[in-house]
């Protein structure tokens, strides 16, 4: 129970999501001693990635998680007269409304036992109602959904200056559906910003196979380690701040990236590809020659709009969607620019916001490929691990499965002086970095939060089938009702090392209005057609 003096120039932190990992790496590299304490058994916090069974275990853990604080007189004796203790919650309150459900065929003769695996039944595990068959017009009926996990991750703080660094509260739904293998190109970040590199293809067996059988739940469980399912799904702009940080800090040597191959749009009940580069625009068969000239003229203006203030100053007070209507663009072009290039809200984004977003999109084109986005191999969970690795290289110490009882705060100054771990050991440090999810609502009363809904699906067919099955896609499905938020869809193929061959991993995200299932199920029904239990039984008997 002895007190541990870490250092006069030290940083204690718990636990390691991406922002905390970046700060720890910076402190460690600048010569400070860093101690990382986390009650979890994995890195990344809410930015982690899991295998299939690992995700189910994680969901089960949060469903059964209790907020019991062990009152131990031993650690209370460590508090001095001029100090007070702030107890830390042992329950992650950033996840809510967790649901797990499966539509895949389950072969009861196969052994699917694995840690965290779902029970062998077709019923929803935590959801009472199962999803009915979706609109078959959007996806061929031959390929349909497999297994589904749905959960909701709650409130998260919304920073006023940098929304990208916000610790997002996730409403998670993981739904399994079926998909095909994918081929892609690998981007390795370099210090040369101007150099455009051809991506190096990864080794993937793309040989044509005979007509495949439906993927069963047992297959998914058996190949579960091939999945890397992100709790937070984001794409990175190729010239964004995080990519620049990865390059300048040399953390990029710990990770590899793939360029997103296509940008999609959902319009009039169908999915289509959006031309974004100059070559794509002029090769597109979706646009007339007049539309191609209109689009190129407008995009050229967006790249240097600040040099022509007279052309947009009068429209600063209106929304970007209204501004597009004044630019002599066809409805087709307006839709593409708003939802697939600027990717802004139809009602909430101003003209300036839309022009900035469009310019940023165009500025990132061509650095590593024909689209502006990158995705890390093995999922977003690699990013916090990369920064943790750098922290460890420069002397950072990591203690997983090691929880903290409380913070010790000076009564007069309000500054944190130490932490007391679950052994009753007092650890002294000059600085502490803690996720606010570990504090009570009263402690974080001044923090503004937002909540997002998340869904993860495993599918056997892409939302837009093409000659190549090695596609990584981003799709925005606009809101149907005024005031509602659009749904961002990211589809990953097996070459991203996030799913098994023959499947795709599809992430859906939107701002929460209700539960994750209520927010995202309509979009899932538009894009996919899940098997009903009757269809599963009928095909299993054939």
Image: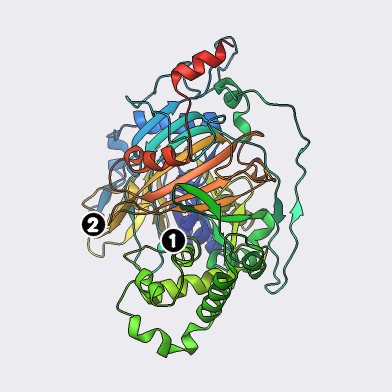
| Residues at marks 1 and 2, CA–CA distance in whole angstroms | 35 Å
**Residue in the image at 63% along x and 60% along y:** 251
* Nearest the eye: 214 or 139: 139
| Local secondary structure at mark 2 | loop
Does residue 65 sit above or below 472 in this rendering?
Answer: above
Q: Determine the image quadrant of residue 450.
A: bottom left
The nearer-to-camera label among 1 and 2 is 1
Left or right: 232, with 286 as reference point: left
Q: Determine the image quadrant of residue 411.
A: bottom left
The residue that disc 2 covers is 82
Give the image location of residue 1, x and y in percent. 40, 40
Q: Determine the image quadrant of residue 264.
A: bottom right
Give the image location of residue 159, x and y in percent. 35, 63
**Residue in the image at 71% along x and 45% along y:** 183
Left or right: 413, with 475 as reference point: left
Query: What colouring method underlies this structural image?
Result: rainbow
Does residue 523 sit above or below 282 in this rendering?
Answer: above
Q: Which of marks 2 and 1 precedes in the sequence?
A: 2
Q: Is residue 531 visible?
A: yes
Residue contact at pointers 1 and 2, CB within 8 angstroms: no
Query: Alpha-carbon neighbours of circle 1 within 10 Å: few (<14), some, or many (≥20)?
Result: few
Give the image location of residue 488, x and y in percent. 45, 52
* Nearest the eye: 363 or 48: 363
The residue that disc 1 covers is 165
Query: Alpha-carbon neighbours of circle 2 within 10 Å: few (<14), some, or many (≥20)?
Result: few
Give the image location of residue 116, x and y in percent. 49, 25
* Nearest the eye: 119 or 280: 280
* Nearest the eye: 449 or 355: 355
């Amino acid at each position: 129970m002895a007190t541990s003096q870490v250092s006069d120039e030290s940083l204690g932190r718990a636990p390691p999501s991406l922002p905390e990992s970046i700060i720890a790496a910076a402190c460690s590299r600048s010569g400070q001693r860093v101690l990382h304490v986390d009650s979890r058994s994995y890195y990344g916090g809410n930015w982690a990635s899991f295998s299939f069974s690992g995700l189910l275990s994680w969901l089960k853990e949060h469903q059964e998680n209790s907020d019991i604080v062990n009152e131990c007189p031993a650690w209370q004796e460590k508090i001095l007269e001029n100090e007070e203790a702030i107890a830390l919650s042992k329950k992650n309150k950033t996840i809510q409304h967790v649901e797990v459900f499966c539509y895949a065929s389950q072969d009861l003769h196969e052994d699917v036992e694995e840690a965290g695996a779902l029970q062998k039944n077709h019923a929803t595990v935590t959801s009472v109602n199962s999803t009915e068959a979706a609109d078959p017009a959007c996806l061929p009926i031959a390929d349909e959904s497999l297994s589904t996990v749905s959960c909701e991750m709650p409130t998260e703080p919304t920073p006023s200056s940098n929304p990208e660094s916000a610790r997002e509260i996730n409403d998670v739904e993981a739904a399994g559906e079926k998909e095909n293998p994918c081929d892609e190109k690998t981007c390795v970040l370099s210090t040369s910003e101007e150099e455009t590199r051809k991506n190096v293809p990864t080794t993937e067996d793309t040989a044509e196979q005979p007509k495949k059988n439906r993927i069963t739940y047992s297959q998914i469980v058996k190949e579960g380690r091939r999945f890397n399912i992100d709790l937070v799904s984001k794409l990175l702009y190729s010239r964004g701040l995080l990519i620049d940080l990865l390059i300048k800090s040399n953390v990029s040597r710990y990770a590899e990236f793939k360029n997103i191959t296509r940008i999609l749009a959902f319009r009039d009940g169908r999915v289509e590809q959006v031309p974004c580069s100059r070559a794509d625009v002029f090769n597109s068969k979706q646009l007339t020659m007049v539309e191609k000239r209109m689009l190129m003229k407008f995009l050229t203006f967006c790249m240097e709009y600040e040099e022509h203030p007279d052309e947009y100053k009068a429209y600063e007070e209106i929304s970007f969607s209204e501004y597009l209507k004044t630019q002599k663009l066809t409805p087709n072009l307006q839709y593409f620019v708003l939802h697939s290039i600027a990717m802004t809200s139809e009602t909430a984004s101003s003209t300036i916001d839309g022009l900035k977003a469009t310019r940023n999109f165009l500025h990132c084109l061509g650095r590593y490929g024909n689209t502006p986005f990158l995705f890390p191999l093995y999922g977003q969970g690699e990013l916090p691990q990369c920064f943790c690795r750098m922290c460890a290289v420069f002397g950072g110490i990591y203690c997983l499965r090691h929880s903290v009882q409380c913070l010790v705060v000076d009564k007069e100054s309000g500054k944190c002086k130490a932490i007391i771990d679950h052994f009753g050991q007092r650890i002294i440090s000059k600085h502490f970095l803690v996720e606010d999810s570990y504090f009570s609502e009263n402690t974080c009363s001044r923090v503004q939060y937002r909540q997002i809904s998340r869904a993860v699906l495993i599918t056997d067919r892409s939302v837009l089938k093409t000659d190549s099955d090695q596609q990584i896609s981003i799709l925005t499905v606009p809101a149907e009702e005024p005031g509602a938020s659009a749904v961002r869809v990211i589809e990953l193929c097996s070459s991203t090392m996030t799913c098994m061959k023959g499947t795709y991993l599809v992430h859906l995200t939107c701002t929460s209005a209700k539960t994750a299932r209520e927010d995202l199920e309509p979009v899932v029904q538009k894009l996919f057609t899940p098997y009903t239990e009757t269809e599963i039984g009928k095909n299993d008997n054939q």
